[in-house]
Image (tube, grey):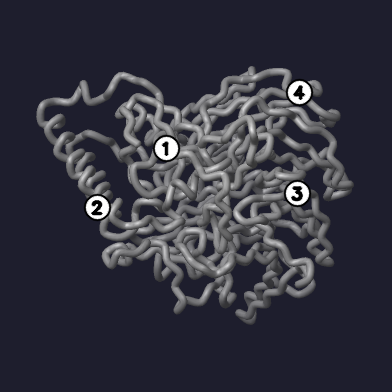
Amino acid sequence: MAASATATSTWPKPNIHTKTKLNSTIQSPSILHFPKQSHQTYQTPSIPTTIVQPKHQEWNFLQKAASMALDAVENIIISQERNHPLPKTADPQVQISGNFAPVKEQPVHHNLPVTGKIPECISGVYVRNGANPHFEPTGGHHFFDGDGMVHAVKFKNGAASYACRYTETERLIQERNLGRTVFPKAIGELHGHSGIARLALFYARGLFGLVDHSQGTGVANAGLVYFNNRLLAMSEDDLPYHVQITSSGDLKTVERYSFDGQLDSTMIAHPKIDPETNELIALTYNVIQKPYLKYFRVSPDGVKSLDVDIELADPTMMHDFAITENFVVIPDQQVVFKISEMMQGGSPVVYDKEKVSRFGVLDKYAKDGSGINWVEVPDCFCFHLWNAWEDKESDEIVVIGSCMTPADSIFNECDEGLESVLSEIRLNTKTGKSTRRPIISPEDQVNLEAGMVNRNKLGRKTQFAYLAIAEPWPKVSGFAKVDLFNGKIRKFFYGDNKYGGEPLFLPRNPNSKNEDDGYILAFVHDEKAWKSELQIVNAMTLELEATVKLPSRVPYGFHGTFISEKDLENQA
């Protein structure tokens, strides 16, 4: 399955008859479920490559010799890896098959077909991030490792347009110039002795000036936030990237964004915008050296606070956190980074069964981390936290999240079936005690992952959450509207053989008295017709209002946001 560096590579054709039970996250070929059709057989799309002037033509003799030697070492590593079967969590034929496979960039397509009527209040652009590997993996690959691609649907006067573009990270630019993948993949490749060898190989290339890792190694594929007149694309392994929406609805990467030189470390992929103060609140973590975690704020006009160091015994995998009106809620859970595990042939992301999960409550305007109150919440791992607020009556912090078991199954292969339980966690900072209860009754239990509350109420008491029905895992068959007060659940399914991702709640009017007065937007893919669409659903009635037919396939992805027409006009 060899291909030249500048040629389009072809992925192996999936077996359309394969049906295997999925026991944990993106681990099983059950995602290779395609309809049997008499007129065609689906073939996984090839990963597009860009033909550019090879950078190695600028190298000196020593660099060219080093490149040849290091390439030979890499070939040895790859040949050794092929002697050992990949775990399903790092097997590209599992992780990026079916509608998890990458697509080519699309320029703007205007006047898309619409069934129904787009509500008049929807004016602006819906953007969603996702992983879309530009080059075919040479080794292990996890779904989270792919290059970031933003999909955008722009609405104006009842019409819709679509475009998708890569976020031009420093990593992607260098790999395009080289015509191949050279940066290590944090989850798919960095495990065991071969992971150590790949790291050493990468830094050796850096020493000879063949690659430059000083400007970041991130993929910017997870989160999106609109702040201070900028759309920021993020993954927690780097600084964010500023992406501009053009007047035509296209996407353009502006720069790797450091808040005008104020941020010199990575930023978590789920920063929060306080709806009252309009501040951006974020975390940054380091897996190598202390402090392993820092907290900071950025004012609405872009002025960053000093970092607040949060003392942790070990580096912790921290994908999300929560805010309240006055506090930051920081999870320190049982999935941790242990580089030493690589020395013993394992993954550096591990479940620490000896550790007790806890949540830290820190004043938003704290000058240092000494005042943080830690409350233990045993056997709790929330990959995402949907909201939190202060309960004045009980003097507790209420946290809403989906508690996932097994905790590390997203990263490590396991046989146990994954369960994600929407839960209410109460933290009493005075007694140091916590309680945790499922919000939905056992008979109505369904895996809920990816979603949101009304972001105008973030950090305040909210009645409703809109969450992806992650079944059959890891696909999303619809979304649930959950009443957080009484546990009642209403479900909306995308249709037969149709699957989607995160439901985005868009308020009809920011000043509406009804919290659920708005619409749900979600990308949906029809696995039988092999076509994609955007569905718009009334959040109050759960009735389908409109469907926008898209010109190309939209892979299953991660998180998104909506930028109003007014905000688009004020972009930096």
Earlier-in-chain disc, 2 versus 3:
2
Q: Nearer the viewer, mark 2 or mark 3?
A: 2
- What type is the residue that disc 3 sits on? Asn
Earlier-in-chain disc, 1 versus 3:
1
* Label 4 sits on residue: 113
* Label 3 sits on residue: 454
- What type is the residue that disc 2 sits on? Gln
Asked if labels 4 and 2 touch by Cβ distance under 8 angstroms, the answer is no
Asked if labels 1 and 4 touch by Cβ distance under 8 angstroms, the answer is no
- The answer to whether one can see residue 514 in this image is yes
Taking depth in this image into account, of 343 and 98 the one nearest to the observer is 98
Measure how far apart labels 1 and 2 are at the Cα level: 43 Å
Q: Position of residue 288 (x, y in %)?
A: 33, 58
> Which residue sits at x=53%, y=48%?
269
> Which residue sits at x=65%, y=52%?
450
At numbered mark 2, what does the secondary structure look like: helix, strand or loop?
Answer: helix
Earlier-in-chain disc, 2 versus 4:
2
At numbered mark 4, what does the secondary structure look like: helix, strand or loop?
Answer: loop
* Label 1 sits on residue: 261
- What type is the residue that disc 4 sits on? Pro
- Please rate how many residues cluster around mark 1, counting C-alpha atoms within 10 Å: few if below 14, some from 14 to 19, many from 20: few
